[in-house]
Image (spheres, grey):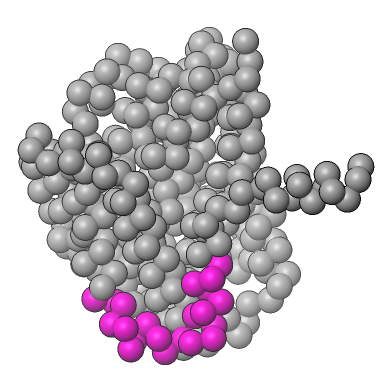
Amino acid sequence: MSKALIWSRIKAIKIDKFILSLFMAIIIAFLVPKGAGVLHLKQVTEIGIGMIFFFYGLKLSFTEVAQGLKNYKLHAIIQLSTFLLFPLVLLLFKPVLVGLVGDSFWIGLFFLAALPSTVSSSVVMVSLAKGNVPSAIFNASISGLIGAFVTPLWIGMFVSQSSGMSLGNVFFKLMIQILLPLTLGLLLNHKFGSIVKKHGSKVAVFDKTIIVLIIYLSFCTSIMGNMFVNVSWLHLVFLFVIVFCLFWMIIGVIYFISLKLKLSIADRITATFCGTKKSLVHGSAMVNIIFGNSISASLYLLPVMMYHITQIVILAVVANKIGKRK
């Protein structure tokens, strides 16, 4: 293969700007850890989280959601995988995982396991792979609503003592920062929903900007608290391997169950793609609400970031390949 051909293929690879910005936020946090305090990012991100869920309510279409209600087997697989299978796997392997990466990273992994699925990327991937798009829209949309209650409950049952969180305080913040803006968005959906959908790309940029700021704030807090002093490169390597194996384990289990239930090819694709996804948007928002000002916040977010990058890269390749079938 000629050098010119190799170089042309390298240039053809598109770098995800959002993923790149996440890494940049971490680097800047290490270089300028006091920047978050100077810019008052704690207050900015709290307002931003409310706006994210307000826009989420405005975008949620009841008509599209209603189209997928009948396929109960598919919905059960996706929601049980998202909120039951993931956490149970982490609890089952807890002794091994704590031994490999320590308590803080295990909390981060369990936090990842308790999160809801993504919305936009799940639908896009299912569409690209020629899966059941209406059911993908339904499950991706309903997952965020379920996660607002289930995620804090999971964390409260198994993590509260080690992280110092108060479940009552968490649900109060949840009401103010997520449920109130979300409900307001749902109530105004019929008036402004079409406008938000029309400017969906701008809303997406806003969401990603807030996530990047939360990542930066979390890492600044942890760096100022010297949380990374005892974190070795070996821990990070083990963490990535665990995230990678977790992803493929869940895919295998979901696909096996889908085959046993004799779902159609389109439904199997939707179950696999939606049931394995985890939302960085919800993770970034909920880490502030659930863990508050904890100096370990960035350690809890790191597995979520790793999983986000893993799912996007792998499922994009898989979806493109499956979508080319006749």
Q: Which of the two residues, 242 or 98, is positioned nearer the viewer here?
A: 242
Query: Could you tell me which residue is drawn at 39 percent across and 39 percent down?
Result: 120
- The answer to whether 149 appears left or right of 236 in the picture is left
Q: Can residue 231 be seen in this view?
A: yes
* Residue located farthest toward the right when viewing the structure as drawn: 1
**280, above or below 20, in the image:** above
- The answer to whether 103 appears left or right of 63 in the picture is right
- The answer to whether 224 appears left or right of 154 in the picture is right
Q: Give the residues drawn in magenta, as a range.
A: 23-43
Query: Could you tell me which residue is drawn at 43 percent across and 53 percent down?
Result: 280
**Residue 210 percent across, percent down from the top left:** 34, 64
**323, above or below 252, in the image:** above
Query: Could you tell me which residue is drawn at 58 percent across and 37 percent down?
Result: 316
**Residue 181 percent across, percent down from the top left:** 15, 53
Query: Could you tell me which residue is drawn at 25 percent across and 24 percent down?
Result: 64
Q: Can residue 256 be seen in this view?
A: no
Prevailing secondary structure of the magenta residues: helix
**300, above or below 28, in the image:** above
Q: Which of the two residues, 237 or 57, is positioned nearer the viewer here?
A: 57
Q: Per the image, is 25 magenta?
A: yes
Q: Per the image, is 194 magenta?
A: no
**Residue 78 percent across, percent down from the top left:** 43, 30
**Residue 272 percent across, percent down from the top left:** 53, 29
Q: Quadrant of the C terminus?
A: top right
Q: Quadrant of the N terminus?
A: top right
